[in-house]
Image (cartoon, rainbow, N blue to C red):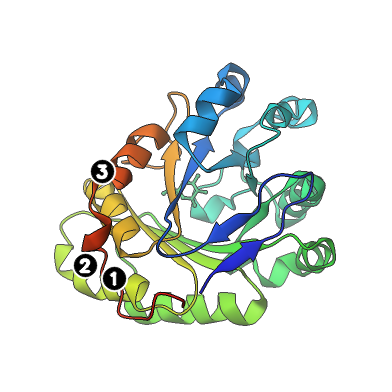
């Protein structure tokens, strides 16, 4: 199901499509943000994620992300229980995200934060800015029923896509069901492992139709086991598209 994400400020729209896995370059500190060359970033990824929770108040005010004027920006203010820094309250995170709506191609809202971000979701709807419903488990592979319920919650709440990141160690027997969760979905979905098998899982899930695939920019990973965005882009590009398993018609 193609899903055009409208973008303010003339940034190119994000087209979420399982046959075109996008690479998100995630920025994990103000120092990294200040040191990036926009042309270099544009060649490494399709979307830049600004982790507002990983920037200081001063760095947020400086709005250093404006140098990426031609690259779609995805803003995140991660809740502490899902790996966010600074133990920010829901009110603080919502205020940070509202402050960047005009610059955003998309906003990340955890599934767990959907109820408390009602005000933000109304503003995003009014501004025509899509949001990605996210889910994180740093301890292991989540129960598949929970993943399905979370994705339905995301869909019913108006998200443009569902994304889940989870620790992937030796639970490799869970891979066939996870593969089906992505490849068999009629709703834009992203999956990614973290930890020991993160790298291979990110290429595999991209092959299976994961729409947003995260790597880091600069030298600071924003999740355990990430590739750099450039490495991930090259790895995804180097696997055969004909190997893509897609049980649904191409126009879905
Ligand atoms: O949700 C995600 C995905 C991520 O956790 C990853 O596993 O690459 C990295 C985070 O910065 C981002 O917000």
State yes or no: Cβ of the residue under disc 1 lies below 8 Å from any atom of ligand 1. Answer: no
- The reply to whether residue 240 is visible in this rendering is yes
Residues under numbered marks 3 and 1 in contact, where contact means CB atoms less than 8 Å apart: no
The relative height of residue 78 versus residue 38 in the rendered view (above or below) is: below
The relative height of residue 186 versus residue 22 in the rendered view (above or below) is: below
Front-lying residue, 5 or 216 = 5
Residues under numbered marks 2 and 1 in contact, where contact means CB atoms less than 8 Å apart: yes
Mark carried by residue 10 = none
| Residue marked by disc 1 | 178
The alpha-carbon separation of the residues under discs 3 and 1 comes to: 22 Å
Q: Position of residue 232 (x, y in %)?
A: 34, 40
Determine the residue located farthest toward the top in the rendered image.
35
Front-lying residue, 140 or 102 = 102
Q: What residue do we see at 62% from left, 25% from top?
A: 30
Discs 3/1, front:
3
Mark carried by residue 238 = 3
Front-lying residue, 140 or 221 = 221
Q: Quadrant of residue 55?
A: top right
Q: Position of residue 109 (x, y in %)?
A: 62, 60
């Amino acid at each position: 199901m193609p899903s055009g994400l409208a973008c303010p400020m003339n940034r190119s729209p994000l087209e979420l499509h399982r046959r075109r896995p996008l690479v998100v370059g995630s920025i994990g500190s103000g120092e990294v943000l200040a040191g990036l060359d926009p042309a270099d970033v544009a060649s490494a990824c399709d979307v830049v994620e600004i982790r507002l929770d990983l920037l200081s108040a001063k760095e947020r005010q400086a709005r250093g992300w404006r140098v990426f004027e031609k690259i779609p920006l995805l803003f995140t203010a991660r809740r502490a229980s899902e790996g966010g820094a600074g133990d920010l309250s829901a009110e603080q995170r919502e205020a940070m995200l509202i402050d960047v709506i005009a610059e955003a191609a998309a906003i990340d809202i955890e599934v767990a934060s959907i109820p408390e971000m009602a005000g933000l979701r109304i503003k995003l709807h009014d501004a025509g800015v899509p949001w990605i419903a996210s889910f994180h488990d740093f301890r292991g592979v989540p129960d598949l029923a929970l993943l399905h319920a979370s994705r339905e919650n995301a869909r019913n709440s108006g998200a443009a896509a569902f994304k889940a990141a989870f620790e992937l160690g030796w639970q490799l027997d869970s891979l066939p069901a996870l593969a089906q969760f992505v490849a068999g979905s009629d709703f834009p979905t992203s999956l990614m492992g973290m930890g020991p098998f993160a790298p291979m899982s990110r290429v595999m899930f991209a092959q299976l139709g994961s729409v947003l695939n995260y790597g880091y920019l600069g030298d600071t990973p924003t999740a355990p086991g990430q590739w750099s965005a450039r490495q991930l882009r090259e790895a995804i590009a180097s696997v055969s598209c004909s190997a893509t398993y897609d049980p649904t018609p191409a126009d879905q």
